[in-house]
Image (cartoon, helix red, strand yellow):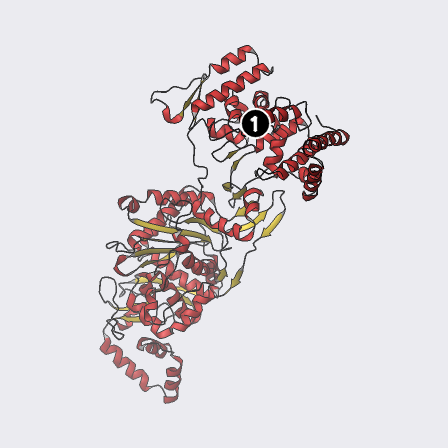
C-alpha cells in the first residue's frame, strides 16, 4: 500500500504537533534542523541499495571469492514465504499494514513501559523505522537521530509499497554471527533456503534480531525456544495462523548440531541448529589476498565491502585447483612436515597469473612465499649467464675447461666435487656444471649479464663478483618467473597481471589493465637458450620434470634446476610455449634439507603439476613456434655435435647432442679429426700457421674476442 504525499504531510504535521505539545517550540526547530542536515531525503530513499559484496571472478568468469564486511545474500519477494513475513510482523509491528510508518499507539505504550520500569525496556519502532535506521543512519541514541529516522521513515512509506518495505527490511536485518538478511540467516542457522523454512523455524529466526546475543539458538537455545513460543502465540492471537498450525509448530523440536548423538536420524519434526561455519573461507586465499590488497589500494573501503564491485582476474581456477592438489599430495611434503614451498604460473603471452601457491595449506593472511620469500635461486639463474654469452656470439658448442680454479680465497666447486676436463656450454648447462658457468661469466663480464636481466623488467641485486654465476642474489618465485617470460614467448618483456578489469555494481567498467608487452630480445637468440633449456629437461638435471602428452610423447618444455649451498633451497624454473612456472622447496628456517636438490625434489613437483593439468585437459601443450620459424627460414640450423669437443659428431663421439646454430656459426670439422691425439693436432696446427701470412694472423687474433685456443684453431681450419 503506497500513501500519497498529501497523507504523508498530514501525518508529519500530526507528528510535529505532538512533539511541539510535548516539548515546545524548540522541538519543532529540531525537526527543521534535522531535515536541513539530511541530503535530499527523496533521493536518498530512491537510491537505496543494500550493501553488496565485491565478487572476484577467474579468467573464465567463475566466481572464486567474495570480499565483504558482513554475510549478506538478498532474497527476492517471491522467495520469502508468507509465514516468514508474518512471523516478523506479529512480533515486531503487528499494525504494519495499517500505519503510515509511525505507530503512535505503539510509541505511547513503549513510553509508558519504559517510564514505569525506569529503563529502556521496550522499543516503539515500526519495521519501517527499523529499516530507516539500519539502512541510512548510525545506531547512536541521540534525539537528532530519532528525528531524522522519522523523516526518512515517512519518505520510505511514500516511496514503496508495504511488500517492498517488508522485503527490504528482511534483507537488511541483522541476525548475529555476521549474518545479515533472512536468506543468509536461513542458510546459516538451518542450512536451508529461505523458501524452505517451516513455521517453527521462521518463528525462531524472527525472534533473533531483537537481541541477537540473547536469542542466538547456537549458544542459548532455551532462550530462543521461549522467544519462538511467544511469536507463535502472537501469530495465532492476531490471526496469522490457526490452532492446528500453532500446535504443530509448538511441538516442533530443535537440537544443536554439536549435541547430535552419533546415531541421529533426521526427521521432519526436528530442526538442527547448525554450528557456526567460518564466515570467510576463501577458495583461493593465495591469490585473493593479493587481489584484495590491490583493490583496497585503489578504492575506498566502503566501496569494496558494500559497493558490489565485480573484479575480473587472471586466475584459472582449474589450474589453481591442480596446483593445490599437487602440493597437498606431494610425497616429499607428506614425509617431512618441516618442508615448505611455493609456486607461481604465468601466461608468457600476456603476463597473466594463472595459479599461485603461497605455501602448504595456505590460509588468508599467511606469509605468501610465492611473492614474499626471497631466496637465492642457485643454478636456476644460469640461463641468464649462458643467454648473455649466446647474445654476444658465443655458440653453444663453445668449449670450456672444467678444472679447478681459485679466485682469492674462493675456490668454487661442482656438485660432487668432481672436474671432468672439457665441456661445451650446451652440456655445461645441461649438467649444471658450476665451473663452466663461472668461467663463461668471467669472459663475458658481469655488466653484460646485468644488462640482460634488467631488460626483463625485474630488479635484481646482482653481486658484482663471479658468484653471480651460481645465483647468489635473492629472488622470489614471482621475480624469477617474470624474468623467465621472454624465454617462453620469444623475447618479450611482459608485466605480470592479477586484475584485468573492474566493473561497478551496474556493470560499468571503472578500471582496465591492458597488456604491457615489449620486445627486448631477438627471437633468434632466445631460440638458442630455449634449445639448451630443453636439453636440461631431456638429458640433464631436470629429467624428473618431463611431462607426457595424451599421445604418449614428451611435450615441448625447458627449464633449469637450482640448488643452494648446504641444500637449503631446491628450485625448478620451467617453461613451455605459453607458460612459465617457477617453484621452490625449502624450510622456513633455511636449514639444510639433507641432499635434496632441484633435480630430486623440485623438478618432480613441477612435473606432477603439469602432468595433472595435461591428463585432466586443463593444459594443452604447444610448440615453440619461434624456433620452428627460424629453422624453416634457415636462420638457425640443427647439427649433431660431440658435446665434449664441440665438433660435429661421428663414430668417434661418445657424447652426442643435437645443437642449434646461427647459420654463420655452423661447425665444419668432425670429432675424428683429433681422435688420434693432441701431438698430431699441434703438428697440423704448426703446418697451417706456416702457410698463413703475419697480416692474416693479426686479423684472426683481433676477431677471436676472448675465445680459447680451440676457437682459434677452428677459425684457422675454417679457412
Q: Residues within 10 Å of mark 1 (few under 14, many from 20)?
A: some
Q: Residue at x 34, y 67 (%)?
A: 469
Q: Residue at x 35, y 86 (%)?
A: 692
Classify mark 1: helix, strand or loop: helix
Q: Nearer the viewer, residue 619 or 262?
A: 262
Q: Nearer the viewer, residue 532 or 437?
A: 437
Q: In this rendering, does residue 564 appear at all?
A: yes
Q: Nearer the viewer, residue 51 or 94?
A: 94
Q: Quadrant of the C terminus?
A: bottom left
Image position of 90 (left or right of 157): left
Residue 676: image location, x then y, percent: 23, 73
Q: Which residue is mark 1?
A: 114
Q: Residue at x 31, y 64 (%)?
A: 427
Residue 253 location, quadrant: top left
Residue 128: image location, x then y, percent: 63, 30
Instruction: Note whether 490 is above or below 124 in the view shown.
Output: below
Q: In this rendering, does residue 614 appear at all?
A: no
Residue at the far top in the pictured view: 244
Q: Quadrant of the N terminus?
A: top right
Instruction: Note whether 640 is above or below 140 in the view shown.
Output: below
Q: Residue at x 49, y 22 (%)?
A: 227
Instruction: Note whether 678 is above or below 136 in the view shown.
Output: below
Instruction: Note whether 637 is above or below 247 in the view shown.
Output: below
Residue 581: image location, x then y, percent: 41, 53
Residue 474 location, quadrant: bottom left
Image position of 139 (left or right of 704): right
Q: Nearer the viewer, residue 173 or 271?
A: 173
Residue 312: image location, x then y, percent: 54, 46
Amino acid at each position: 500500500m503506497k500513501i500519497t504525499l498529501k497523507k504523508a504531510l498530514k501525518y508529519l504535521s500530526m507528528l510535529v504537533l505532538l512533539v511541539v505539545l510535548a516539548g515546545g517550540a524548540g522541538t519543532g526547530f529540531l525537526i527543521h534542523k534535522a531535515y536541513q542536515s539530511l541530503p535530499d531525503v527523496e533521493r536518498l530513499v530512491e537510491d537505496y541499495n543494500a550493501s553488496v559484496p565485491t565478487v572476484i571472478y577467474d579468467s573464465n568468469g567463475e566466481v572464486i571469492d567474495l570480499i565483504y564486511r558482513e554475510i549478506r545474500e538478498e532474497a527476492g519477494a517471491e522467495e520469502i514465504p508468507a509465514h516468514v513475513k508474518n512471523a516478523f510482523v506479529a512480533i515486531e509491528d503487528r499494525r504494519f499494514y495499517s500505519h503510515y510508518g509511525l505507530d503512535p499507539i505503539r510509541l505511547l505504550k513503549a513510553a509508558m513501559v519504559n517510564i514505569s520500569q525506569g529503563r529502556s525496556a521496550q522499543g516503539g519502532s515500526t519495521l519501517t523505522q527499523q529499516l530507516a535506521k539500519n539502512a541510512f543512519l548510525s545506531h547512536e541514541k541521540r534525539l537528532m537521530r530519532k528525528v531524522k529516522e522519522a523523516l526518512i521513515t515517512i519518505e520510505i512509506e511514500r516511496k514503496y509499497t508495504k511488500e517492498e518495505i517488508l522485503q527490504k527490511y528482511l534483507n537488511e536485518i541483522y541476525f548475529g554471527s555476521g549474518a545479515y538478511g533472512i536468506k543468509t540467516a536461513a542458510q546459516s542457522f538451518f542450512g536451508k533456503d529461505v523458501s524452505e523454512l517451516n513455521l517453527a523455524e521462521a518463528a525462531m529466526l524472527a525472534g533473533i534480531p531483537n537481541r541477537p546475543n540473547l536469542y542466538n539458538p547456537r549458544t542459548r537455545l532455551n532462550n530462543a525456544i521461549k522467544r519462538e513460543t511467544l511469536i507463535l502465540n502472537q501469530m495465532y492471537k492476531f490471526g496469522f495462523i490457526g490452532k492446528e498450525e500453532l500446535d504443530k509448530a509448538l511441538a516442533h523440536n530443535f537440537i544443536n548440531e554439536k549435541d547430535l548423538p552419533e546415531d541421529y536420524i533426521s526427521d521432519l519434526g526436528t530442526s538442527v541448529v547448525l554450528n557456526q561455519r567460518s564466515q570467510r573461507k576463501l577458495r583461493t586465499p593465495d591469490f585473493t589476498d593479493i587481489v584484495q590488497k590491490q583493490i583496497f589500494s585503489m578504492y575506498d573501503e566502503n566501496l569494496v565491502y558494500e559497493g558490489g564491485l565485480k573484479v575480473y582476474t587472471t586466475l584459472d581456477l582449474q589450474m589453481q585447483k591442480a596446483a593445490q592438489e599437487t602440493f597437498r599430495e606431494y610425497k616429499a611434503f607428506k614425509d617431512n612436515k618441516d618442508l615448505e614451498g611455493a609456486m607461481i604460473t604465468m601466461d608468457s603471452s600476456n603476463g597473466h597469473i594463472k595459479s599461485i601457491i603461497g605455501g602448504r595449506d595456505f590460509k588468508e593472511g599467511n606469509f605468501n612465499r610465492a611473492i614474499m620469500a626471497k631466496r637465492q635461486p642457485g643454478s636456476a639463474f644460469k640461463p641468464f649467464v649462458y643467454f648473455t654469452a649466446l647474445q654476444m656470439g658465443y655458440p653453444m658448442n663453445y668449449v670450456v675447461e672444467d678444472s679447478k680454479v681459485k679466485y682469492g680465497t674462493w675456490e668454487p666447486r661442482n656438485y660432487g666435487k668432481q672436474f671432468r676436463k672439457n665441456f661445451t656450454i650446451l652440456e655445461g648447462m645441461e649438467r649444471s656444471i658450476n665451473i663452466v658457468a663461472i668461467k663463461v661469466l668471467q669472459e663475458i663480464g658481469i655488466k653484460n649479464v646485468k644488462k640482460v636481466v634488467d631488460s626483463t623488467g625485474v630488479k635484481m641485486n646482482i653481486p658484482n663478483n663471479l658468484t653471480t654465476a651460481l645465483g647468489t642474489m635473492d629472488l622470489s618465485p614471482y621475480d624469477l618467473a617474470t624474468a623467465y617470460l621472454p624465454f617462453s614467448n620469444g623475447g618479450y618483456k611482459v608485466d605480470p597481471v592479477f586484475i584485468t578489469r573492474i566493473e561497478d555494481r551496474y556493470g560499468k567498467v571503472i578500471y582496465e589493465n591492458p597488456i604491457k608487452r615489449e620486445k627486448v630480445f631477438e627471437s633468434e637468440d632466445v631460440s638458442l637458450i630455449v634449445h639448451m633449456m630443453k636439453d636440461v629437461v631431456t638429458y640433464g638435471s631436470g629429467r624428473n620434470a618431463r611431462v607426457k602428452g595424451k599421445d604418449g610423447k614428451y611435450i615441448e618444455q625447458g627449464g633449469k634446476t637450482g640448488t643452494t649451498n648446504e641444500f637449503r633451497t631446491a628450485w625448478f624454473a620451467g617453461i613451455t610455449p605459453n607458460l612459465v612456472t617457477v617453484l621452490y622447496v625449502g624450510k622456513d628456517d633455511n636449514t639444510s634439507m639433507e641432499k635434496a636438490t632441484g633435480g630430486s625434489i623440485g623438478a618432480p613437483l613441477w612435473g606432477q603439476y603439469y602432468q595433472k593439468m595435461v591428463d585432466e585437459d586443463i593444459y594443452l601443450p604447444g610448440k615453440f613456434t619461434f624456433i620452428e620459424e627460424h629453422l624453416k627460414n634457415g636462420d638457425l640450423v640443427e647439427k649433431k655435435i660431440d658435446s665434449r669437443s664441440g665438433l660435429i659428431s661421428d663414430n668417434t663421439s661418445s657424447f652426442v647432442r643435437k645443437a642449434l646454430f646461427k647459420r654463420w656459426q655452423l661447425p665444419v670439422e668432425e670429432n675424428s679429426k683429433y681422435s688420434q691425439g693432441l701431438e698430431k693436432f699441434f703438428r697440423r696446427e704448426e703446418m697451417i700457421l706456416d702457410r698463413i701470412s703475419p697480416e692474416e694472423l693479426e686479423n684472426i687474433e683481433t676477431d677471436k674476442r676472448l675465445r680459447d685456443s680451440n676457437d682459434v684453431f677452428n677459425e684457422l681450419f675454417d679457412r
